[in-house]
Image (spheres, rainbow, N blue to C red):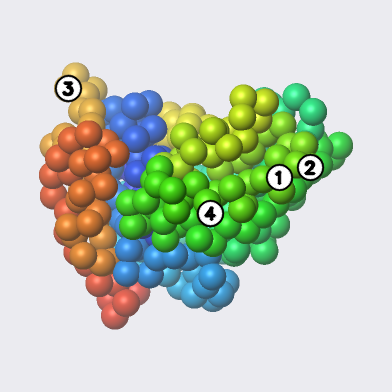
């Protein structure tokens, strides 16, 4: 199995915000991305469903050559990461701890808001991680289940998106948060209207960059960088990068073009629902 292959997965297109950070910080890495678009959104699913879905995806990524896994999904990071770390030898990084640490670092008043899926909020992962770092911080978590479908439908900065966001964000603004964690990888697509609604007094934290920085340190420590870095690759359409989806290819490829500004190269639809389980590592 070659060095330098990072596997990322998400319920859909949101994890592309994490993939973009991998392309930027680790241009020498080959990326395999899996978007579980047949099962999006993840937020309303049970713990058993989420663990089963993530297990199938990680097994698949390992068989495709992934040497390191990034959970590019907050819901899976909150619910499935620890369970699957115990099942697989492949090293893994999730979004929760790096995102929490970044929020504590930039917060000026220790009043941190979190918007996330129902499953992430129910797991209490961000609040727990923040309190472990800084017990004096106050955490205000809000489930925002309508946001993922908006992003998946391409409604990024529309009047409908504005109305939904205002209903979610204005109560957090009224209680005086100074920092907001975008606790789902879909939410950075909505960064512009979120910033407009909350105003300049609230810092927005996207856990993607902090997570990839943490992964980069681990990858270097474990010696998983490619042996030949004389021809670094960058961008989604570089040779060797692969994109897999469990749903239709067309809508996903369209988002890649719009968000990453380039052709996605090879996008393959794969149905993992009936794929026999294999052991990764």
Marks 3 and 2 sit apart, C-alpha to C-alpha, by 51 Å
Sequence order check, earlier mark of 4 and 1: 4
Mark 1 near mark 2, Cβ–Cβ under 8 Å? Answer: yes
Quadrant of the rendered image containing residue 241: top left
Query: Marks 2 and 4, how far apart in space?
Result: 19 Å
Which is more foreground, mark 4 or mark 1? Answer: 4
Q: Which residue is drawn at 54% across and 33% down?
A: 196
- Camera-near label (1 vs 3) is 1
Res 175 label: 2
Which residue matches tag 1? 172
> In this figure, what is the number of numbered marks?
4
Residue closer to the observer: 73 or 225: 73
Numbered disc 4: secondary structure: helix
Q: What secondary structure is found at the residue carrying circle 1?
A: helix
Q: Is residue 29 left or right of residue 107?
A: left
Q: Which mark is residue 164?
A: 4
């Amino acid at each position: 199995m070659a060095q330098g292959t990072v596997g990322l997965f998400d319920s859909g297109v949101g994890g592309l915000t994490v993939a973009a950070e991998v392309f930027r910080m680790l241009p020498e890495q080959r990326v395999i991305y899996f978007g579980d678009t047949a099962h999006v959104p993840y937020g309303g699913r049970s713990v058993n469903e989420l663990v089963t879905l993530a297990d199938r995806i990680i097994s698949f990524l390992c068989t495709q050559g992934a040497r390191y896994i990034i959970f590019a999904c907050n819901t899976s990071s909150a619910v499935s990461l620890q369970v699957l770390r115990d099942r697989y030898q492949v090293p893994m990084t999730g979004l929760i701890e790096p995102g929490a640490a970044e929020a504590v670092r930039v917060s000026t008043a220790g009043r941190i808001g979190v918007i996330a899926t129902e499953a992430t909020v129910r797991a209490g992962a961000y609040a727990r991680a923040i309190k472990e770092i800084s017990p004096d911080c106050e955490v205000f978590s809000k489930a925002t289940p309508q946001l993922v479908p908006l992003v998946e439908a391409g409604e990024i900065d529309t009047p409908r998106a504005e109305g939904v966001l205002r209903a979610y964000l204005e109560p957090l603004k009224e209680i005086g948060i100074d920092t907001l964690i975008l606790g789902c990888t879909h939410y950075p697509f909505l960064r512009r209207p979120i910033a407009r609604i909350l105003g300049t007094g609230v810092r927005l934290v996207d856990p993607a960059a902090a997570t990839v920085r943490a992964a980069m340190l681990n990858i270097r420590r474990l010696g998983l960088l490619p042996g030949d870095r004389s021809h670094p690759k960058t961008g989604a359409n570089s040779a060797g990068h692969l994109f897999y989806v469990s749903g239709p290819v067309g809508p996903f490829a369209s988002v890649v073009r719009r968000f990453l500004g380039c052709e996605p190269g090879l996008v393959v639809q794969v149905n993992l629902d009936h794929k026999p389980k294999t052991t990764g590592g």
